[in-house]
Amino acid sequence: MSLPVLVKKLCKSWDDKTVLDDINLTLAPGSITALLGPNGAGKTTFIGCLLGLLAPSSGSVALWGQPADALSDETRQRIGFVPQLMTGLTWFRVQELKDYTASFRNSAGTSQHSAVTSQEAKQWEDWADLDPKARLSTLSGGERQRLAIVLALRFSPELIVLDEPVASLDPMARHDFITLLAQAVKRRETTALISSHIISDLEQICDRFIVFKKGHLISDLSAESFASEIRYLASRPVSELGLHVMAGLPDGSVWVKGWRPELDGIGLPVLPGDMESCFLALTR
């Protein structure tokens, strides 16, 4: 069976500027991957290539074995995309836009698991809590984002790609969105890729964290390996310990990889650390 996402040696340039450089990664079913990076790191360009909206300068992106820029209609219906900002179509009413986007599907129950699709659709629409008669032009930024999420996820897609989906949501809506997304992935072995600067949200549900910096993929960590192998130390360890220094900070503290249980008792100055602190160190 083909992987949902297979990226090989992906490069993307605009004129003489390289935006993505030699990106290689795969995404497997049942995973939620966080795509992290500072502004300008190449995250949105990567998502554009992943969805076939942008053509690679070199390398390849395949979804279920098909080139991302030449997907069949059937494969496109397996994808749900939430953009960072939903614009346009402001003359539509909420229900009109739902009906309009549904017309691009084979039917309102295109999924092979139509009962699951119906259940998920109701969950997402209850969460969004939007007036079906309201025009998009009258919706707040948060309401438009909730609508974008509903439009993308109510058909139970097998690949979910989200570009800053929660930036305009209030804390309660964010909390409930994260919970529903995790439930959907677990229930159907969906593949999800989510780009966000709110790392505390991602830590709750993501099992993998990839970090971009200036167009390069500089770190690829599972949540499990972060907990077991990654440590934040007050000072640089001696080389004999075999630890790899991932990032150093001006105060002399370091993030290291390769921690082993036998090192717990030798008195190294281990400090409290979290994913956000590690990300900041890696991208400084």
Image: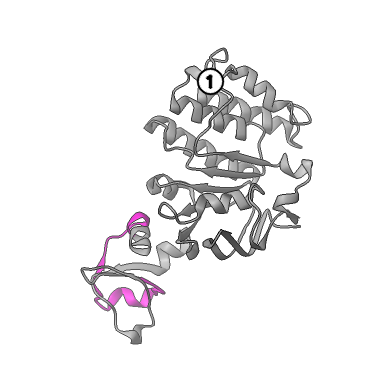
Tell me residue 207's x, y (percent).
50, 54
Q: In the rendered image of this protein, does residue 262 appear above or below residue 30?
A: below
Quarter of the image where one finds residue 186? top right
Q: In the rendered image of this protein, does residue 176 appear above or below residue 247?
A: above
71 and 181: which is toward the camera: 71
Callout 1 crowding tier (Cα within 10 Å): few <14, some 14–19, many ≥20: many
**Residue visible at 37% across and 59% down in the picture:** 279
Residue lying at the far bottom in this picture: please name it.
240
Q: Which residue is mark 1?
A: 136
Q: Say if the magenta span includes residue 142.
A: no
Q: Say if the magenta span includes residue 256.
A: yes
The N terminus lies in quadrant: bottom right
Tell me residue 141's x, y (percent).
44, 27
At mark 1, the secondary structure is helix
Tell me residue 122's x, y (percent).
60, 25
103 and 15: which is toward the camera: 15
Quarter of the image where one finds residue 272? bottom left
Residue lying at the far front in this picture: please name it.
15
